[in-house]
Amino acid sequence: MTPKKYQAHTVIIGGGIAGITTAIELLNANKRVIIIDRDIKKNFGGLAKESFGGMFFINSSQQRFSKIKDSVEQAKKDWFSFAEFDKNEVWGEKWANEFLESTHKVYEWVRSKKVKFFPIVHWVERGLFQTGNSVPRFHMVWGTGHGLIGALLDHLKSHSNYQNLTVYFQHKAEDFEFENGNMISVIGVDEKSNIPFVCKATNFVIATGGINGNMKKVRKYWHKEWNTPPKVILNGSHQYADGLIHDKVSEIGGNITNLNLMWNYAAGIPHPYPKRENHGLSLVPPKSALWLNYKGERMGPIPLVTSFDTRYLVTKICEQEKQYSWQILNEKIAYKELGVSGSEFNEGIKNKKIISFLYSVIKGNKHLIKTLEKDSPNYITANSIEELSQKMNKLTGTNDIDSSTLRESIESYDANFERGKNIWNDEQIRRIMHTRAYKGDRKRTLKPQKLNQKKAYPLIAIREFILSRKSLGGIQTNLHSQVLKASNNNKEDHVFENLYAVGEAAGFGGGGSHGKRALEGTFLATCIFTAQKAAKHITDKYQNE
């Protein structure tokens, strides 16, 4: 079959936020650009479009509005503390430094595309055994990731050089062609018509995302600190983040690093309305809920509480014989604190309806709660501890939950409130108090209180699984986003001259700029930053064209 033939100055493989940013920057230089995207047009924007839209910035106007003192120096201390970079890591550290010194540029770039941020900055990944975010840095996009991508696409479509861009959807890149050491084309197939294609160009940019949509690869590279992979791992990544292009880069001699470093979440449930195979929904667990293992025992010695160290949560759950967990709460807690990490079920912010958003903050996300009650078998309600334990066992088909064990877990926590506020002695209560001390979290976090109280019934148990999300490792790149060869020995010029990798495909810079942990909000921002670096190097090379 005769293949379709395309040609451009630069071909971008992948239409997520990194690919879109690269295209915008190249159009600014009047370059002819093709984006090859495997998804359908409706989903243009990739996983970023489904995200909550938090972005990490330093010393922003929103921080200053809230009188939060921040600096690049402090952010570097936090980042490197949380990253725990391997002693042999070079390019990840270089990219981390480069990004942290440039977040103000990313901020201004995003704002120039008519993106707005909620005035209150959120405080996540505060750290547990390693210092995390010492101050709030999670800037919520007004409109979530859906609105962020919408703004970038609006900018793209109104661009004076928009006619220089062609986007081919449902096109799968499968292989590369080289000539005299330079890449000359991408070979693939139009999956809609099943007709092969060849796309020739002067430069090529890989923006295909990571490997975390491919459960075989997730299991293959599972980090040794997490023991064996859980029996159930839900997919919270993109269905086409399959690592196929990573394999091709490796085949041609490119360096792939740190694939065992992943940013997975601890509180996933099967999506009530799945859009892809094994589709998971990432819950934001309430800080006032008890986090228990498969037997109904509280994990420790440090109790599991969200927003301090996500990697620790995953680690503790994976230490268990059965690697899933339970959240135990009541309806009052659910309405106030239970949320979803993503644009879905956050209609107030997503649709930029301030009244709806404020109502959900004050009264709770009732739409989410009613949806889970109705359509998620992993969301269980009951009017006694005994009834709850019976329903939990019925769901799992086991007798793992002994009602007396579950009662002890709940009552030992509740006993703190019998002893008087001045002698509360529970680490979870201290973390709740710490959370409420910051105004950005006070409205969304209840005062410490008993869990088992009839006025807050029904009791609720949510069975949660590990959810695969982001690849912190990937294709190793220099500070121009050029793909480094496997034999580079940390030499910046030992590269494929016209092959670039950006965003998650490049481990958010250098094949691993986050190390072992992310300070959150850093994924979207580093996708933009790595794309800008690639586009600048491409345009600088050909500025006289």
Image (cartoon, rainbow, N blue to C red):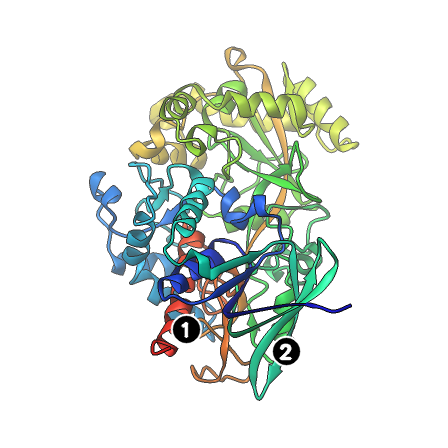
User: Which amino acid does the dot numbered 1 rest on?
Assistant: Ile
Q: Give the mark nearer the N terminus: 1 vs 2.
A: 2
Name the spot of residue 27 as percent of width and height, x first. 40, 62
Q: Splitting the image into 4 quarters, where does residue 122 fall? A: top left
Element carrying mark 2: strand
CB contact under 8 Å: marks 1 and 2: no
Q: Report, in whole angstroms, how far the alpha carbon at label 1 lies from the one at label 2.
A: 20 Å
Looking at this view, is 410 or 230 the one in front?
Answer: 230
Name the spot of residue 234 as percent of width and height, x first. 66, 45
Classify residue 420 as left or right of residue 51. left
Report if residue 459 is visible in the image. yes
Q: Does 179 sit above or below residue 54?
A: below
Q: Which residue is mark 2?
A: 177
**Quadrant assignment for the C terminus:** bottom left
User: Count the marks: how many?
Assistant: 2
Q: Does 309 sit above or below residue 515?
A: above
Q: Which mark is residue 538?
A: 1
Tell which residue pokes out farthest to the top in this image: 455
User: Which amino acid does the dot numbered 2 rest on?
Assistant: Glu
Name the spot of residue 284 as percent of width and height, x first. 50, 36
Looking at this view, is 405 or 39 the one in front?
Answer: 39
Report if residue 404 is visible in the image. no
Near mark 1 (Cα within 10 A), the count class, few <14, some 14-19 or many ≥20, is many
**Which residue is depicted at the point 33% across and 47% down?**
137
Q: Does 211 sit above or below residue 538?
A: above
Element carrying mark 1: helix
**Quadrant assignment for the N terminus:** bottom right
Q: Which mark is residue 466?
A: none
